Image (cartoon, grey):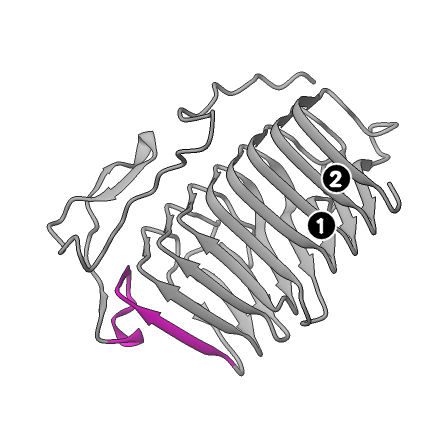
Amino acid sequence: MLNTTILLNSCKFNLNTGSTPTTTGDLVSLNNSIFVGDDLEVFNNQNLSSITAQNSKLTLINSNIHHNQEFANSADQLFELFYTVLKFENVFVTDNQFSTNFSFLGDGSGDTVLFKNTHILRNTGNLFIVTTIEDFKLVNSVVANNLGPSYITLGSFVLGTKAAMINSVVSGNRNNTSLINLVQMYDSELMIGNCIINDNTNSGISTMNFSINAYQSIIQNGSALGPTILDVDPMFVDPASRQFQSTNGISSHQYRFTFECTGNRYTREPSPTRWIL
């Protein structure tokens, strides 16, 4: 889609495939366009990248993206965005299988990425590959129980990226070796505020030419990041049911760990749809 404005409401994208089992394509491809989706469900699509965009604006709200997959070892992305403004609000991203789930490339001048009230759960592959994005934010969101590749668990922020995680939970994310860092950073900045980061394969951050500003958070093995960082068990209410509120008696006025998706019609996560192969 070139030079187009697309407004979609209450739509489903499902059971789409690449033209052959070994030929991949794009479910949606945007170029210099605006795409706004409200109440979308994107599921059970195979052998393709879900959404690619260049020089565009992409907004998804009140939506669910689940059980999509690439062709084996095809190095596809669930979202591949170049110089594109992205906004997710009240979105579930669950049970997808891609080499990379979110790939962002910007030029450091006006590129913004916002995940707000978003659940990113049980996906396989790199979660975030973020390069030269001026403003990347994860706000009031949960990133949990994802399986990363052998060289990184959560994501990489490189080449001038300015990232922030605010009032969010990052927990239970895994890869196949305990030697891998949770985050890789190069020539970038990361701010962590009022977050819980625990029970991941590795809590380390691989860094070079970096800046990290962390405050009022629970971060496993993160005490050295500052005097208001606690290395304690958050004692979640019930992480299996996505109730990530802390119950360990931390002062509620200082650590407000509440994670609500009040605008999302998926107030309970939709039942997974079986793969159709």
**Residue 34 image position (x, y, % from top left):** 75, 45
Query: Are there few (<14), some (14-19), or many (20+) residues within 10 Å of tag 1?
Result: many
- Between the residue at mark 1 and the residue at mark 2, the CA separation in whole angstroms equals 18 Å
Q: Nearer the viewer, residue 158 or 59?
A: 59
Few, some or many residues within 10 Å of mark 2 (<14, 14–19, 20+):
many
Does residue 152 appear in the picture of this structure? Answer: no
User: Which dot, 1 or 2, sits closer to the camera?
Assistant: 1
Q: Residue at x 66, y 34 (%)?
A: 37
Q: Amino acid at mark 1?
A: Lys
What residue lies at 66% left-to-right and 26% top-to-bottom? 9
| Location of mark 2 (residue) | 49
Classify residue 33 as left or right of residue 198. Answer: right
Magenta-colored span: 210-226
Q: Earlier in the sequence, mark 1 or mark 2?
A: 2
Quadrant location, the C terminus: top right
Q: Nearer the viewer, residue 174 or 157?
A: 157
The answer, for residue 57, to whether it is visible in the render is: yes
Please determine whether, in this image, residue 161 is positioned above or below residue 116: below
Magenta stretch contains residue 266:
no
Residue identified by numbered label 1: 57
